[in-house]
């Protein structure tokens, strides 16, 4: 390289001489211009308000545009969810917009499904192919044979399409693979599911209890802000986690629980609260039923009993229970979000809901408060589409999971395998969710995919699922498109705008455009009378005289504040059949489930195996951000956390123990092997489990940065335990052993 | 037990401690050797009696070595086109700045000394070979000859400054425990003398001159051993960071190289050879000076590399 | 009126180590791939289950005693308004003496050939804004301000809360304080 270096210097010298002549009076060259403050000049000539799509939280952002490029993204101070602050992903949105691996043009599959061989075609050809496929499926199997999997705000257009098309099979992994059990449990106990964002008043809590939730690594912006505010105001934190999480490091009490034994701990906490009178008796007397049954149920669930099961010191259990009880009613048991662990998850969440009730924090300041949506009218067009004639098909024949309140994505996958359900699904549209990483039991998923007559994937990046699609439609990123307004529930209702910051790169198109064009091709144009997404939102606002001007310039429209907790004069919302908090659930009893949560031991790890746990890193949203160069730089790959002492006595590694950062291969109980992944030897985890951040181990080679980095917990999740109450897929039931990664030649 | 997790995974910032590669030790080695050449040729030229024709040429070695060293330094600069920035400022707190300016002084002084040292026929030959520059050579020599003594004094001073500077450059960087020692300046100076003497011994100087160089080299090696000892004792008796730094040379990753290359190859063996040669037990060969040169380069290399761990 | 003395308080109790400061810094300052002016350190002590962890958002300490400025041969590294340590890139040769002299590893070589580091976003501060890292921090763990002004928030925090600086033994008098 000596020659090229010399050449470089010569070329550089010539160039610099020319530049010096060109500037004429080179005051800078003589240092006469002093030391001006360096200014990177990234402030936008234009600043556009919108909301974020790096995760589902939907924080308000301000996008700075200079010379046609988005230079930076900051939080919108007017937006209630971001309050001017962003998590790293929100700040790193340009890494998605300018990802060099983005899908650029529509693609048609040219080889076997999964081989990821495609041909670029025009939108007309691609949508024509989709329309042709859909019409064929409709003729042969009926419109309901089409399912939609969706994640993210842009999916709303595709849901509209499904309704117009006549299929009820709209699912999202965010229910049965994520928050479903807690929705069912809170519905059973208080009559309402929690939804997103959760109706939690973290900021005013005096004690916050996290059970398996690693808030802080899990960057739900508003919640993390409020958690910090609460801690700053002196609130206490109790964290139950087999891992010394970031939250655990800030906790008054960390309970390093044996995985799978949470219900025992919760029952013993309930036991202590009841035995020591640390519950809100007056509140329960007025609002709850089943206290006596509960007392009898936990009579023997002492901390000593639970200590033997959970591996926790009974003194620690008792002390933490007392701290939790003393802070009532502003003692917040966080419901968690990713709650599908062991198949008994609704019951675990029920135990948490019962604790919430005992503490009297439902409907109270510093607890669970009321939220409402901004009063936005529908688009004023005539006539709703006809309702689908056949019911949704996400449950097996004979109908199980009686309390599932949303469509089971896993059920839709199963209904694609012939003969499993009432009828077979024959076509999928997959919008912005990479089912390959989201679903357990990958071989079974791929088997279902191979049964399809049509698979259409809509995405921004060439995600793994795109490799299996017949048609891949490249969507514009959230910074390049208008969308429907955000209208989620909040303590003060608000509406947030999504608007195009810069025009779409390449030949990508916004979701509304894709849907409108597709609808035209299948003769459903009458259901999409709006001109574009902006006109759609403007027309909805116009119904009640709400201001597009304010919404589009400030990014939000605020609704009227209203009382959100009892202290402010709000009534409790209890929409159970009895109108009371149901500590004892007659509904469950009637369905032959345990009316009160019961601890049943989980399967133990086979010899030399560790239970596989997974979670989040603050820089990443599942596998969606792992190719984002900005976000990947500080966190380029996941590692498998292994207790350092367990590593020192790992069977098979006696002669040469594992070293920090060494690459290993994980092999699960079914012999499935992970890609090589670095091992993190740490004191921060129990000796009976390992942990990895979800989302790596991507097999899509076209995501050039992410490909081959880290390992996938989803790949190793070949087993799952179904929650019989709501159909959640409990995934923490897999075990792995370690092998040294083969040396790369 | 302590676990440290730093989230900056990048080649730009991750190995940020290791800021200097091969260029700086090479530069320090050549600069030190040039300093040695300046000092030793001045001393030899000041001696009464005959001078060999080789010795008359040798003062030119100093600017030549400095030039090669500066090329190495230049290669290390990340923004090479701004090298002239060194000469728009003099920062008295910055050894790097001192060095830049010393290098600039080295040229006129050492070149004039060298021209004055030439015999008339050598100067004539040189002027003839340089074509258009010949006139300049003649005029410069005419300027230098009557002032030879003063110039040699200046050469001595600048040489000592240059030699000290090569060590001080490192020793002022207090963030690196291994370098934070005031012994480094004198240590690198005597090492420079030793390597300078070794270089001169590679040329066909007279027997008498060679003998003097060998004697001086022995003194320099002796001083170097003492200073190295002081350096290590100073580190080992210092605070924890210093002790850790000493550990690099006393039982750590650089121990083998340090003892084998610097102490045995660069100091012990050549000293022994020179003693034996001085006592006429052995015939003088090029082995001893070659080993000294290896040891001198190794010393800089190990010090720069180990200091950045 | 005394001269300004800019400083930052980093609340290790609030910080969750999310790296929002890092990403905002990168986009605000248009840093190249691989360059970081701030970063997160998690320091864990103890053995399972008796563990403590301190999380720090670290950056240049804008020291009161600046070995980097002393080591700079060209005057590129200098102390600007309020004690902020800056590098004038048009004067920097990239000799790296400042990097060798910094006990904190806060400096790195920009691919354009000059040494780069945190500026406390002085360009923003001059416009009356806070540094980009502070602006985005979801836990409001970062507080920038004038330590010479006893009424400033940063003065209040540093004076009232226990805190530490990094490597006090280096004698650099850092102006980034970690509240514990």
Image (spheres, coloured by chain):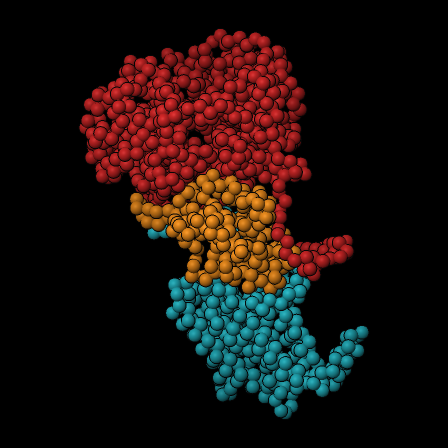
Chain colours: A red, B cyan, C orange
Residue ranking furthest to the bottom = B49
- Is residue C75 among what the camera can see? yes
Q: Which of the two residues, B101 or B18, is positioned nearer the viewer here?
A: B101
Q: Position of residue A652 (x, y in %)?
A: 34, 45
- Is residue A688 among what the camera can see? no
Q: Is residue A143 above or below residue A504?
A: above
Residue drawn at the location 48% of the way across and 16% of the way down: A169
In the drawing, does residue A439 fall left or right of residue B168? left
> Looking at the image, how many numbered discs can be counted on the residues?
0
Q: Position of residue A687 (x, y in %)?
A: 31, 41
Q: Position of residue A667 (x, y in %)?
A: 39, 36
Q: Position of residue B100 (x, y in %)?
A: 62, 68
Residue drawn at the location 54% of the way across and 38% of the way down: A91
Q: Which of the two residues, B144 or A540, is positioned nearer the viewer here?
A: A540
In the drawing, does residue A243 fall left or right of residue C130? left
Residue drawn at the location 59% of the way across and 48% of the way down: C126
Q: Which of the two residues, B271 or A731, is positioned nearer the viewer here?
A: A731
Q: Is residue A360 above or below residue C55?
A: above
Q: Is residue A617 above or below residue C57?
A: above
Q: Which of the two residues, C110 or B127, is positioned nearer the viewer here?
A: C110
Q: Quadrant of residue B93?
A: bottom right
In the drawing, does residue A132 fall left or right of residue A400? right
Quadrant in the picture for the N terminus of chain A: bottom right
Residue drawn at the location 61% of the way across and 59% of the way down: C76
């Amino acid at each position: 390289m000596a020659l090229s270096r010399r050449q470089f210097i010569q070329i550089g010298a010539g160039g610099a001489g020319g530049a010096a002549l060109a500037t004429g009076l080179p005051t800078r060259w003589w240092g006469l211009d002093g030391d001006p403050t360096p200014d990177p000049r990234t402030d936008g000539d234009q600043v556009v308000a919108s909301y974020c799509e790096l995760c589902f939280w939907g924080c308000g952002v301000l996008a700075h545009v200079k010379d046609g490029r988005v230079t930076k993204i900051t939080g919108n101070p007017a937006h209630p969810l971001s309050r001017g602050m962003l998590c790293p992903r929100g700040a790193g949105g340009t890494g998605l917009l300018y990802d060099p691996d983005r899908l650029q043009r529509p693609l048609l599959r040219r080889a076997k499904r999964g081989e990821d061989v495609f041909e670029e075609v025009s939108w007309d050809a691609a949508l024509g192919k989709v329309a042709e496929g859909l019409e064929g499926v409709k003729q042969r199997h009926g419109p309901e044979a089409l399912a939609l999997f969706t994640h993210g705000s842009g999916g709303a257009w595709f849901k509209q399409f499904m309704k117009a098309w006549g299929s009820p099979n709209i699912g999202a992994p965010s229910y049965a693979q994520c928050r479903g059990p807690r929705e069912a449990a809170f519905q059973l106990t208080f009559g309402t599911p929690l939804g997103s964002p959760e109706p939690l008043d973290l900021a005013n809590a005096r004690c916050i209890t996290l059970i398996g939730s690693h808030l802080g690594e899990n960057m739900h912006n508003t919640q993390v802000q409020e958690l910090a505010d609460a801690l700053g105001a002196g609130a206490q934190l109790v964290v139950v986690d087999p891992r010394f999480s970031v939250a655990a490091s800030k906790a008054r009490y960390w309970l390093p629980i044996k995985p799978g034994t949470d219900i025992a701990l919760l029952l013993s906490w309930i036991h202590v609260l009841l035995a020591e009178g640390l519950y809100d008796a007056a509140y329960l007397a007025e609002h709850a039923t089943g206290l006596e049954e509960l007392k009898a149920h936990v009579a023997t669930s002492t901390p000593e009993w639970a200590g033997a099961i959970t591996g926790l010191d009974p003194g620690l259990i008792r002390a933490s229970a007392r701290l939790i009880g003393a802070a009532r009613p502003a003692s917040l048991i966080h419901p968690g979000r990713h709650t599908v662990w062991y198949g008994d998850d609704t019951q675990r969440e029920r135990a948490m809901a019962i604790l919430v009730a005992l503490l009297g924090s439902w409907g109270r300041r510093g607890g669970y408060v009321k939220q409402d949506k901004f009063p936005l009218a529908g688009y004023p067009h005539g006539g709703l589409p006809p309702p689908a004639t056949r019911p949704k098909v996400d449950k097996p024949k004979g109908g199980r999971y009686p309390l599932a309140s949303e469509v089971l994505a896993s059920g839709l996958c199963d209904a694609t395998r012939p003969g499993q359900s009432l009828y077979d699904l024959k076509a999928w549209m997959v919008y912005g969710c990479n089912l390959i990483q989201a679903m357990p039991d990958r071989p079974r998923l791929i088997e279902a995919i191979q049964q399809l007559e049509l698979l259409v994937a809509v995405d921004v990046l060439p995600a793994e699922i795109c490799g299996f699609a017949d048609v891949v439609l490249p969507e514009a990123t959230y910074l390049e498109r208008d969308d429907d307004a955000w209208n989620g529930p909040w303590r003060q209702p608000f509406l947030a705008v999504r608007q195009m910051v810069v025009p779409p790169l390449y030949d990508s198109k916004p979701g509304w455009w894709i849907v409108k064009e597709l609808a035209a091709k299948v003769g459903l144009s009458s259901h999409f009378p709006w001109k574009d997404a902006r006109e759609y939102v403007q027309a909805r606002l116009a119904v009640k005289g709400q201001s597009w001007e304010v919404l589009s310039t400030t990014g939000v429209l605020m609704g009227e504040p209203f009382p959100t907790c009892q202290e402010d004069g709000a009534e409790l919302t209890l929409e159970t059949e009895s109108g009371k908090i149901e500590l004892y659930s007659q509904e469950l009893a009637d369905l032959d489930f345990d009316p009160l949560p019961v601890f049943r031991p989980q399967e133990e790890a086979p010899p030399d195996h560790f239970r596989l746990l997974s979670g989040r890193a603050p820089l990443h949203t599942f596998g969606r951000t792992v190719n984002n160069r900005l976000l990947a730089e500080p966190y380029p790959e996941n590692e498998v956390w292994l207790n350092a002492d367990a590593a020192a006595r790992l069977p098979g590694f006696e002669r040469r123990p594992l070293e920090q950062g060494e690459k290993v291969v994980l092999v699960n109980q079914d012999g499935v092997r992970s890609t090589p992944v670095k091992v993190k030897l740490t004191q921060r985890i129990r000796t009976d489990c390992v942990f990895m951040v979800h989302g790596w181990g991507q097999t899509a080679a076209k995501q050039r940065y992410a490909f081959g980095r880290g390992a996938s917990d989803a790949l190793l999740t070949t087993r799952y335990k179904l929650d019989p109450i709501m159909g959640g897929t409990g995934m923490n039931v897999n075990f792995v052993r370690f092998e040294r990664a083969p040396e790369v030649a | 037990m302590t676990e440290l997790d730093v989230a900056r995974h990048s080649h730009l910032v991750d190995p940020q401690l290791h800021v200097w590669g091969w260029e700086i030790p090479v530069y320090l080695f050549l600069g030190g050797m040039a300093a040695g050449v300046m000092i030793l040729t001045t001393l030899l030229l000041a001696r009464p009696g005959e001078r060999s024709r080789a010795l008359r040429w040798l003062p030119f070695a100093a600017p030549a070595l400095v030039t090669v060293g500066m090329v190495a330094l230049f290669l290390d600069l990340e923004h090479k086109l701004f090298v002239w920035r060194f000469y728009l400022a003099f920062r008295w707190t910055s050894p790097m700045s001192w060095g830049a300016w010393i290098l600039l002084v080295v040229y006129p002084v050492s070149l004039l000394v060298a021209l004055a040292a030439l015999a008339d026929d050598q100067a004539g030959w040189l002027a003839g070979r340089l074509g258009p520059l010949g006139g300049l050579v003649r005029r410069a020599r005419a300027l230098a000859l009557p002032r030879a003594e003063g110039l040699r004094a200046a050469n001595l001073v600048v040489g000592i400054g240059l030699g000290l500077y090569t060590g001080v450059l490192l020793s002022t960087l207090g963030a690196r425990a291994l370098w934070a020692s005031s012994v480094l300046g004198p240590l690198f100076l005597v090492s420079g003398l030793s390597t300078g003497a070794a270089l001169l011994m590679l040329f066909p100087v007279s027997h008498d001159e060679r003998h003097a160089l060998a004697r001086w080299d022995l003194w320099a090696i002796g001083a170097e051993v003492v200073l190295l000892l002081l350096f290590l004792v100073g580190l080992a008796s210092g605070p924890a960071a210093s002790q850790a730094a000493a550990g690099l040379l006393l039982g750590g990753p650089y121990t083998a190289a340090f003892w084998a290359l610097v102490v045995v190859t660069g100091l012990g063996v050549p000293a022994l050879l020179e003693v034996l040669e001085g006592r006429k037990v052995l015939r003088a060969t090029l082995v001893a000076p070659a080993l000294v040169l290896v040891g001198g380069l190794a010393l800089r290399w190990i010090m720069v590399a180990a200091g950045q761990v | 009126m005394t001269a300004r003395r800019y400083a930052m308080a980093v609340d290790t109790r609030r910080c969750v180590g999310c790296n929002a400061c890092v990403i905002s810094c990168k986009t605000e300052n248009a840093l190249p791939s691989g360059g970081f002016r701030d970063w997160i350190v998690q320091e864990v002590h103890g053995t399972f289950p008796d563990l403590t962890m301190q999380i720090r958002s670290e950056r240049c300490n804008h020291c009161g005693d600046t070995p980097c400025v002393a080591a700079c041969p060209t005057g590129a590294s200098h102390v600007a308004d309020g004690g902020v340590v800056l590098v004038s890139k048009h004067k920097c040769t990239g000799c790296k003496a400042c990097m060798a002299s910094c006990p904190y590893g806060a400096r790195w070589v920009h691919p354009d050939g000059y040494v780069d580091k945190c500026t406390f976003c002085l360009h923003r501060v001059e416009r009356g804004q806070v540094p980009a890292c502070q602006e985005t921090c979801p836990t409001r763990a970062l507080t920038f301000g004038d330590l010479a002004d006893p009424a400033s928030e940063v003065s209040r925090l540093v004076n009232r809360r226990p805190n530490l600086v990094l490597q006090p033994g280096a004698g650099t008098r850092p102006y980034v304080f970690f509240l514990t």
